[in-house]
Amino acid sequence: MRATRQYLLTMTDPTLAKEWLSKISNTISDGNHNPQTTCLNLAITANGLRTLGLYEENLHGFSREFREGIDTDHRNRLLGDLGSSSPQNWEFGANSENSKDKALADTNIHVMLMVFAKNEATLQEYCQEIEPVLSAHKLQILMPLDGCLLKDNKVHLGFLDGVGQPAIEGIHSGSNPENTVATGEFLMGYKNEYGVYPDTPFIVKEQGDLHLLSLDAAGSGKRDLGHNCTYLVYRKMEERVDVFWKLMNENTKNEDGSLNETESIKLASKMVGRWPNGAPLVNYPDKEPEGLNTEDNFGYHATDTAGQKCPFGAHIRRNNPRDSFEGNTASRSLKLTKKHRIIRRGRSYGEPLVGTPTHHTAEGEIGLHFMCFNADIAGQFEFIQHTWANYPRFENLYNDPDPIIGTLDIADETLIQNFTIQGEPVNKCIENLQQFVTIKGGAYFFFPSISAIKYFSTL
């Protein structure tokens, strides 16, 4: 599904909105669907559930992060949404106090309808069918967010995207055990990597058609609204491709000041942890191999404990340390990192530029619609962003945030942001990193099962 449009919707008539949910539940793409032309999903915010009429007693069973939303003072510090990424600068999703446009504040974002199609023409036709139905049910379109997959599935920064994904126990048979994660990390109603069922919203005050909901898998006898559901984190991320490649070029130029394209690409790859074609540095430390490369069956413990192939601070290594984490054994590291995995999806927006050292200036804003799925927002998405990406002392580093998604653009003369490349006899330090990704909006959503969607229509 190479073309996408995500509609941010507000429900102005809850009764008609519930009629719409009842109808659309039969067209939602489920886990057995193998779409060829189009598919459809939806996600709902906490304020959307309130608008539908879910009792506060039942809403309280959802995680605090979901109920509070992505824009709180605490969460801004946690996620690094400061400076140019501050919610005061967001296009949508900020709380009412911070929002530039009150109509696009988090209180008004109720649903994200996710429309996918095999190509742009099919997407436009499908949306022409969908939009009159939305209007008839008084679902106001706040903003359409169009996206696509770029050439070779790369992102604007120039690197192959979406390679390092976890396999799910019970779903992906025959997968590498080191990369296979318990179902409960991604779906409520199943045991997670801790061997327990993740927190899930139970119905504690009866409402709606409870026969549509499963009983609690743990045996409490309560109806489980979360069974087969998860949480969706959405972030609109502007990619500052020009800034990125200019910094790479500046730090690798020849003695006469001319461009050294080979070294520029190598430095960029060190920061990412993969070459532009997707090949992991730990397997190809010196040169990018031919063709696209989706290798993901690798670790660091046996072949790169010192970080001399793939630096400790590289984006993919710190966001998934695999079998080499803070001096633990390989098996212990895997146990720890599996508790903090996410399923990530991305769609690019803006000019279809794929950046290189010589081609990196776009007309207008370009970036990525970042989406990830997790059953525990705090323990998965927020943990990764705060503890692994933003933390400057990750793996005994000192002033090294994630060079791709952890740098800040704030007025603070004491802020030092470096990238360290481990080496012999000495390390090399790239100083004064700039912010390459700016947050433009976001929200936390509940991603419901089809049964849950049908249940919401009966409230």
Image (cartoon, rainbow, N blue to C red):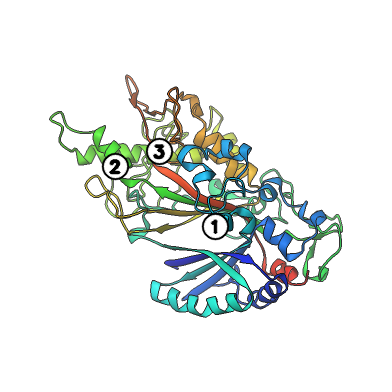
Q: Name which quarter of the figure residue 418 lies in.
A: top left
Q: Earlier in the sequence, mark 3 or mark 1?
A: 1
- Where residue 253 appears, x then y in whole percent? 20, 33
Is residue 264 shown above or below 423? below
Instruction: Mark 2: give few (<14), some (14-19) or many (20+) Cα within 10 Å.
Output: many
CA gap, disc 2 and disc 1: 40 Å
Q: As rendered, which of 41 and 237 lies closer to the eye? A: 237
For the view shown, which residue lies furthest in the left direction?
256
Q: Amino acid at mark 3?
A: Gln
Left or right, residue 131 beside residue 313:
right
Q: Earlier in the sequence, mark 2 or mark 3?
A: 2
Q: Which structural element holds mark 2?
A: helix
Instruction: Mark 1: give few (<14), some (14-19) or many (20+) Cα within 10 Å.
Output: few
Q: Which structural element holds mark 3?
A: loop
Q: What residue would you read off at disc 3?
A: 435
Q: Earlier in the sequence, mark 2 or mark 1?
A: 1
The answer to whether residue 75 shows anywhere in this view is: yes
At x 69%, y 68%, the residue is 453
Residues at circles 2 and 3 in contact by the CB criterion of under 8 Å = no
Q: What residue would you read off at disc 2?
A: 245
Q: Amino acid at mark 2?
A: Trp
Q: Amino acid at mark 1?
A: Gly
Q: What residue would you read off at disc 1?
A: 174
Q: As rendered, which of 161 and 307 lies closer to the eye? A: 161
Left or right, residue 134 beside residue 354:
right
